Amino acid sequence: MDDYYRRLKDTLCTAQLVRSLAVAPDIAGEEALFLDGKLIDSTCAFEKREDNLEDPICLPPTLVMFGAGHIASALYKIAEIVGLKTAVFDDRKEYCSKERFMNAQRHVLPFSDIDLEKHHFDNPYFIIFTHGHKADGICIRKALKKGSSYIGMIGSKKKIEATWNELENEGFTRKELEKVHSPIGLDIKAATAEEIAVAIMAEIICTYRGEKDSIEADLAILKALSDLKEEAVLCRIIRKTGSGPARKGAEMLVASSGCIASIGGGALEEEAKKKALCLLSSKGKTMICDFDLTSKGELGMACGGKASVMFKYLSPSSAIR
């Protein structure tokens, strides 16, 4: 069943999926993947039921920046703070440097030579602000052909309209062009490069957090599940009400050697780890536990709300069964 998680990981890198999870006692933990409403993979002979939990899932975006100027540098620093991966293209080596973009993928070459098919980015978000705007037109064409949930381009309304007219004459539709965020960023009256970067990041966060109430998948967990080396228990928040550290869809993989990722930290996570280790030692069946996150609950938390966690035992040979 490792193949199921491998398929999930690989498909998520290029598309948004709906993950349908069974919670009925007899088949709890079985799941299936749907793309545009069509079943593409499942962990068993999957049955569609009204009580299944269905959530759109996606990977956090990778910011792919065309241009390595002052705004790009500021945006990169903010991306580091919020934990988003970045890649930057520029034809100026002194700008697209390790000193300015330490942890980013860096590509120094003429913008006309960029071939996005030769590069792999998880859920790419394209941001276009080339030096002097000289190569913006080249890059917007490449981004539109590649496709993305987010494409943003700096420019005045007059310049944008002229560019759109050119692109329409080349065969791009007005519907495609209207999805481009240009002028880029939320309108916060930004003036400096740093303020413009804040406005862009705010728009990016608004886009990917608001995409059909998508649940963010953890690539580290999917990689581990696609090539499971030891027995483990997958802990997943399947329901959440009120406040609290947990978020719906958050997952944590617990093994004897340690844990991958988090379901929110605090007392909830500590209790979940204990239950996961007990299930691990007994090789037990999938179970769902409800947690009261109020001061009156068993965990003595003050944040409020409730959370339900599914615990599923996995072995290297069967991964999901």
Image (spheres, rainbow, N blue to C red):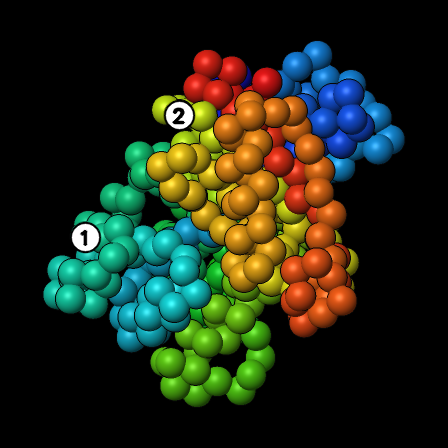
- Residue 88: quarter of image: bottom left
For the residue marked with disc 1, what is the amino acid?
Answer: Val
- Secondary structure state at the residue bearing disc 2: loop
Vertical comparison of 85 with 26: above or below: below
Mark 1 neighbour density, 10 Å: few (under 14) some (14–19) many (20 or more): some
Vertical comparison of 102 with 308: above or below: below
Please state which of the two labelled residues, at mark 2 or mark 1, is closer to the viewer.
2
Q: Residue furthest left?
A: 94
The residue beneath circle 1 is 108
The answer to which of 245 and 9 lies nearer the viewer is: 245
The answer to which of 236 and 298 lies nearer the viewer is: 298
Q: From the top left corner, tell me how far across and down residue 265 is, in percent.
A: 52, 58
Vertical comparison of 315 with 224: above or below: above
Q: Is residue 297 left or right of residue 144?
A: right
Tell me which label, 2 or 1, sits earlier in the chain: 1
Q: From the top left corner, tell me how far across and down residue 47 is, in percent.
A: 78, 18
Measure the C-alpha gap from mark 2 to mark 1.
41 Å
- Residue 287: quarter of image: top right
- Secondary structure state at the residue bearing disc 1: strand
Q: Residue at x 38, y 80 (%)?
A: 194
For the residue marked with disc 2, what is the amino acid?
Answer: Glu
| Quadrant assignment for the C terminus | top right
Q: Residue at x 55, y 67 (%)?
A: 203
Q: From the top left corner, tell me how far across and down residue 248 is, in percent.
A: 66, 50
Q: From the top left corner, tell me how far across and down residue 25 is, in percent.
A: 78, 26
Mark 2 neighbour density, 10 Å: few (under 14) some (14–19) many (20 or more): some
The answer to which of 313 and 120 lies nearer the viewer is: 313
Q: Is residue 258 left or right of residue 309?
A: left
The residue beneath circle 2 is 230
Q: Residue at x 57, y 59 (%)?
A: 267
